[in-house]
Amino acid sequence: MLRAGPTGYSVLVAAWTAGTLAGTIAMGAGIALAGTAAQLWQAAAAYAFGGLANGMEVVATRSFLNHRAPEQVAGRVFAVYSGVLFGAASAGMAAAGGLLSSLNPRAVLFLAGGGGLATGAVGWLMYARRHGRGRPAGARPASPLPPPGR
C-alpha cells in the first residue's frame, strides 16, 4: 500500500503502540493536573484533556481487538475486554471512595493520575524491551495489526 515493505510496516506497528501508550499517559496527566487546579474551570480543562485522550485510546484499543480477534471468538474477546475495563473502573472508584475518608480530594486525584502515568510508562518500557534490544538479530516483532491485504 505505501511501498515501504517490512520496515514501513514495523514503523506503523510501533506508531500504533506508541499512540496507545501516549493516550494512557495523557489520561493520567489529565487526572493528575486536575489535582493542581485552583478553580473549577482548570479542573474541567484537565479532565477534558484526559477524556479526549481516553476516547482516542478506547477507539484504538477496540480497533486493535476488532482487527486481531478471530471472528469466531470476537464476541468473547470484547466481553472480556469490557469486563476488565468496567471491573477496573468500579474497583478504582471504590478505592477512591475509601481513600477520600482519609485523604483530601487533591491527593486522591494525584494518586489516580499517577497510576495512569505509571501504567503508561511501564507499558512503554515493556514494549521497548520486547521490541528493542532484547530481540535476537533478525527476529521480527509481533504485530498488533493484521498483515497488509487482510
Image: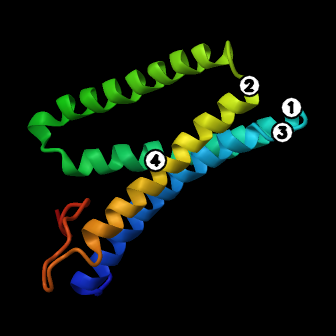
Name the residue carrying label 2. Answer: 105
Dot in front, 1 or 3: 3
User: In this view of the protein, which residue sits in the foreground, 60 or 97?
Assistant: 97
Q: Residues within 10 Å of mark 1 (few under 14, many from 20)?
A: few
Can residue 81 be seen in this snapshot? yes
**Disc 2, SS:** helix
- Residue at 78% from the left image edge and 42% from the top image edge: 45
Name the residue carrying label 4. Answer: 119
Counting residues from the start of the chain, the first of labels 4 and 3 encountered is 3
- Residue at 28% from the left image edge and 76% from the top image edge: 9
- C-beta proximity under 8 Å, tags 2 and 3: no
Counting residues from the start of the chain, the first of labels 4 and 1 encountered is 1
Tell me the CA gap for discs 4 and 3.
23 Å
Dot in front, 2 or 3: 2
Q: Position of residue 10 (x, y in %)?
A: 28, 76
- C-beta proximity under 8 Å, tags 1 and 3: yes
Q: Amino acid at mark 4?
A: Thr
**Disc 1, SS:** helix
Q: Farthest residue to the left: give it.
A: 72
User: In this view of the protein, which residue sits in the foreground, 107 or 79?
Assistant: 107
Counting residues from the start of the chain, the first of labels 2 and 4 encountered is 2
Q: Amino acid at mark 1?
A: Leu
Q: Which mark is residue 40?
A: 1
Q: Which mark is residue 37?
A: 3
Tell me the CA gap for discs 4 and 1.
27 Å
- C-beta proximity under 8 Å, tags 4 and 1: no
